[in-house]
Image (cartoon, rainbow, N blue to C red):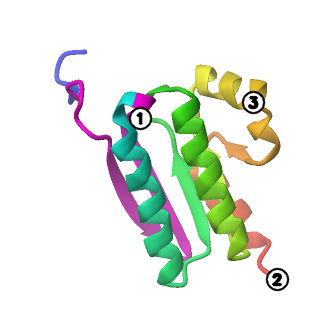
Amino acid sequence: AEGEPRLKRGVTVDIREHVAGTVTVLEPLGRMVLSESPADQFLKERVAAQLREGRRQFIVDLHHVSQMDTSGLTTLAAAYIAVRKQQGRIVLVNPSERVRELLRVTRLDTLFQMFDSEDDAIASLTQTQS
């Protein structure tokens, strides 16, 4: 669309990051596909860095992910495992229909809670602190 930021082929996915209270929100922008694998490392590194800082609650907002393949799914699974190892929680927000379908087919939807809004995800993450 006119005026939309366009990512050229070969450009790494950027990741926007912000903090909402105790929750870290990571927002990949672009494609999570094999040809852009440095982006996958980037997401894992961002999660690892946040875990080192003691953060344990994560939202991955997939609203701006235009394309995803098994490489992107592997990245999400790796992030999930890293967070769970530290007794943390990680949820997904705004996956597209196509991404939801991929998650269902690969049964990764059994790992990730999915929410339609960041507010709902934050409420879920923060209400169950024990």
Give the spatial CA distance, label 1 vs label 3.
Answer: 21 Å
Q: Nearer the viewer, mark 3 or mark 2?
A: 3
Residues shaded magenta: 7-34
Is residue 107 visible in this depiction of the protein?
yes
Quadrant (top left/top right/bottom left/bottom right) for the N terminus: top left
Among the two numbered marks 1 and 2 on one chain, the one whose residue lies closer to the N terminus: 1
Q: Name above or below for residue 41 compared with residue 129.
A: above
Among the two numbered marks 3 and 2 on one chain, the one whose residue lies closer to the N terminus: 3
User: SS at mark 1?
Assistant: loop
Amino acid type, label 1:
His
Q: Nearer the viewer, mark 1 or mark 3?
A: 3
Read off the residue under disc 2: 130
Amino acid type, label 3:
Thr
Among the two numbered marks 1 and 3 on one chain, the one whose residue lies closer to the N terminus: 1
Amino acid type, label 2:
Ser
Spot occupied by residue 65 in the image (x, y as percentages of width and height): 44, 33
Quadrant (top left/top right/bottom left/bottom right) for the C terminus: bottom right
Q: Residue at x 17, y 23 (%)?
A: 3
User: SS at mark 3?
Assistant: loop
User: SS at mark 2?
Assistant: loop
Read off the residue under disc 3: 106
Instruction: Say whether residue 87 is left or right of residue 7.
Output: right
Q: Residue at x 35, y 34 (%)?
A: 36
Read off the residue under disc 1: 64
Q: Is residue 33 magenta?
A: yes
Q: Nearer the viewer, residue 62 or 108?
A: 108
Instruction: Say whether residue 71 is left or right of residue 126.
Output: left
